[in-house]
Image (cartoon, helix red, strand yellow):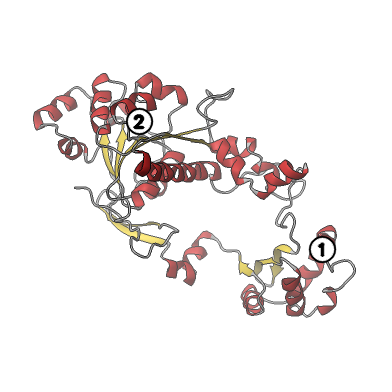
Amino acid sequence: MPFTPASDALKHIKVLDLTRVRSGPTCVRQLADWGANVIKVELPEALEGGNQLGGKRHGSDFQNLHRNKRAMSLNLKDPDGVAVLKKLVESADVVVENFRPDVKTRLGVDYDALSAINPRIVYASISGFGQDGPYEKRPGFDQIAQGMGGLMSITGLVGQGPVRAGIPVADLTAGLFASIGIFVALLERGESGKGQWVQTSLLQAMTFMLDFQAARWTMDGTVPKQAGNDHPTSIPTGVFTTTDGHINIAVAGQAIWKRFCTSIGRDDLADHPDYSTGELRSANRHALNAIIDEITRTKSSEEWVDLFNEAGVPAGPINTIDKVFQDPQIQHLGMQRGVDSPNVGRRIDLVGQPIKMSRTPSEIVVYPPDPGEQTDEILAEHGYSEAEIADLRGRSVI
């Protein structure tokens, strides 16, 4: 299967993907989906010992992370395997890895070693806590970063105790930030002609994602706490009961507050001495939310969502995952994309990119590869003969 770009945007960029599990593959998926020539490098199956990380190869998680790539096997614990990687680096643009910080140096595939071969290489590293510092050698894990980065202290109902987010947000955001760093480095390389080392970590990503909650501390010394389904500062914003479930309502600012009061037939609340300003509504949130919840219980979720949106009050249903993909707007945006996979044995639907480009759109054009599926093809592209490839395979280098 020759290289088939998923987009014209990055089809001139060659990426060596040394990553595993989630944060690294999330980063590389952004490059692959925008057309980069991604070569996924993995340990030969015979050396994996049945302990592959990242879930079942043909499972939904792995398939969603690794579309639009080609795969080759390579034993980086063997000097000849490292030599093969360095041969590939000569013509590569990007290397992405998420080893523990000391592992890549021990293998001889760190930034200094590879940039000496190709000074234009953009080398991206994702770790749990950073490439140096007091936590350098700690193993990183999404939920650990969620806790250390403060997210779990502000997630969940008041008094419930710490709660993790329902997605691996530290892994995902670290991967996305790494891809942003790569794009920046590639743009800068166009001016300087030089690559550079891009670094991020789960802990950095999680801390950055605290956003306004973090700034409440850094600027004002406020330690945010759990607020449940209420917005921390903008009330009434939260979850309200209907005849058939629940909806979200987001009332921000005085204009929307007045429209909201009219929508629920309670104009008297707009200038009520307990609720007339944002500060008062926040201070008296429990009483106000109880009043609103009593009213929203009189109509269905669909009725309220339609009524509020017609009035210019932000509101929406709280969907289960199946209903997300049944939503007509999600379908219109093309967030579910299919590709035929001979490895899985059927057409599979995956999650599409959330970015639209007018000239260089992203598609899912290549099914996720099986281990080492394109090894021979990739090595031949880099000048290896059939005899050399056979020799490497015979010695379990590939």
Q: In which image quadrant can residue 359 be found?
A: bottom left
First along the sequence among labels 1 and 2: 2
The crowd level at tag 2 (other Cα within 10 Å; few <14, some 14-19, many 20+) is few
Q: Is residue 183 above or below residue 16?
A: below
Between residues 296 and 39, which one lies in front from this camera angle?
Answer: 39
For residue 146, which quarter of the picture?
Answer: top right
Disc 2 target residue = 50
Residue depicted at x 43% and y 62% = 335
Task: Judge from the rendering whether residue 123 lies leftward or rightward of residue 373; answer left or right.
Answer: right
Exactly how many numbered labels are in the figure?
2
Mark 1 sits on what residue? 281
Residue 1 in sight in this render? no
Q: Quadrant of the C terminus?
A: top left
Q: Residue type at mark 1: give it.
A: Arg
Helix, strand or loop for disc 1: helix
Disc 2 marks a residue whose amino acid type is Gly
Observer-nearest residue: 149 or 351?
149
Whole-percent x and y of residue 24? 43, 39
Camera-near label (1 vs 2) is 1
The reply to whether dot 1 and dot 2 touch (C-beta < 8 Å) is: no
